[in-house]
Amino acid sequence: MTLWFVFALMTAAAIFAVLLPLGLTGRARGGGDETTVYKDQLAEIERDVAADLIGTREAEAARVEIGRRLLAAADKEANAPLQSNTRLRRLAAVLALVGLPLVAVAIYLPLGSPRLGDFPLAARAVKPSGDQSVETLVAQVEQHLEKNPTDGRGWTVLAPVLARIARYDDAVRAFRNAITYAGDSADRRADLGEAMVGAAGGVVTTEAKSEFDRALSLNADEAKASYYLGLAAEQDGRAQEAAAIWRAMLEKAPAGAPWRELVQTALTRVGGGTAPALSDSTIAAAKDMNDSDRSAMIRSMVERLATRLKQNGDDVEGWLRLVRAYLVMGDQEKAKSALNDARQAVAGDPERLRQLNDGLKNLGFDG
């Protein structure tokens, strides 16, 4: 209401600015027209007669001529010009009073945001910039959603950000609202289940499992839901079922699937691996080979990887792939040897050593 009151005041000021000159112009016409000049001339003739500067006959002739001009000017001024000026002033007043607000509204409605609410004072104090923190941006979106709780697009944008900054309980609520107001879908159900797993400290709860089942009922190829159902089986002690789920994922996975390595690691963890976690191109090339040729090719690739790492040991991901490959091939001794070589290679770099130990934990080794 305050905004509309300000707009009304601004409109009234604009109309007043237009009408004021019109009113002043109408009143000023009476002081400087032709009739005033002729009246002054008549008075001057009377002064000249009194001072014997002009004769009686000449004065009478001058009075007649000036009187004639005075009557003509008065008649002209009383008719057409005044009527014309009055019409113009009335037309201008109508345009100012009616046309100006209509034009303003016609422009504002398509270009403005009449339904946009006021921003909180705290939000107005924040200048938009490219270096705003995630927390600040999240707070702004949350303030918007407090006033617009049915904005499905807003919940859809906010939910994954909340999950990324580990606000899992809030992320669960946001994903639920996104489903309610933006529509149900397999990926939203899978994201909701993942947020529930995060809120439970990594445990796939019954409620989260239910969301993953719903996701697969909507899309049987939903990778995230399948992975977490495999994780649920692993956590329940059903390693063979987990391996079957993850192995099925790898069999139908596209060549560039970003989650392939994660699933391969999980499969290795439960002892269900059938091939080392090498590149997608290697796996694709091995599809048409027999078991003997495929095994020979894989061992050759693993040995080349080991040779390269001995020459350049800074590749933490390469070391993890090598250890994983030895584990999949069932060569525990080579896996432990590669693990020791990896730690020695990155011992002088604390960050790389931390990354290596984190990766080894996922493979079942102590950091």
Image (cartoon, rainbow, N blue to C red):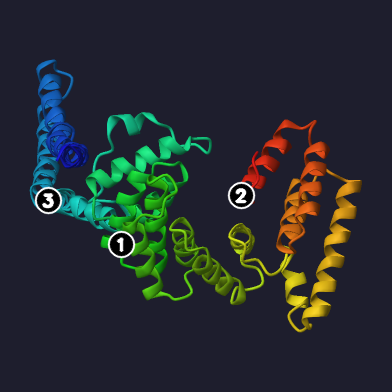
- Badge 2 amino acid: Asn
| Mark 3 or 1, closer to the camera | 1
Q: Which residue is mark 2?
A: 362
Check disc 1: other Cα within 10 Å, few if <14, some if 14-19, many if 20+. some
Q: Which mark is residue 201?
A: none
Q: Earlier in the sequence, mark 3 or mark 2?
A: 3
> Relative to 212, does residue 26 appear above or below in the rendering?
above
Q: Which residue is mark 1?
A: 179
Furthest residue to the top? 51
| Mark 1 or 2, closer to the camera | 2
Please tell me which residue lies in front, 279 or 291: 291
Residue 48 shown left or right of residue 326 in the figure: left
Q: Secondary structure at mark 3?
A: helix
Q: Earlier in the sequence, mark 1 or mark 2?
A: 1
Q: Position of residue 318 (x, y in %)?
A: 77, 52
- Badge 3 amino acid: Arg
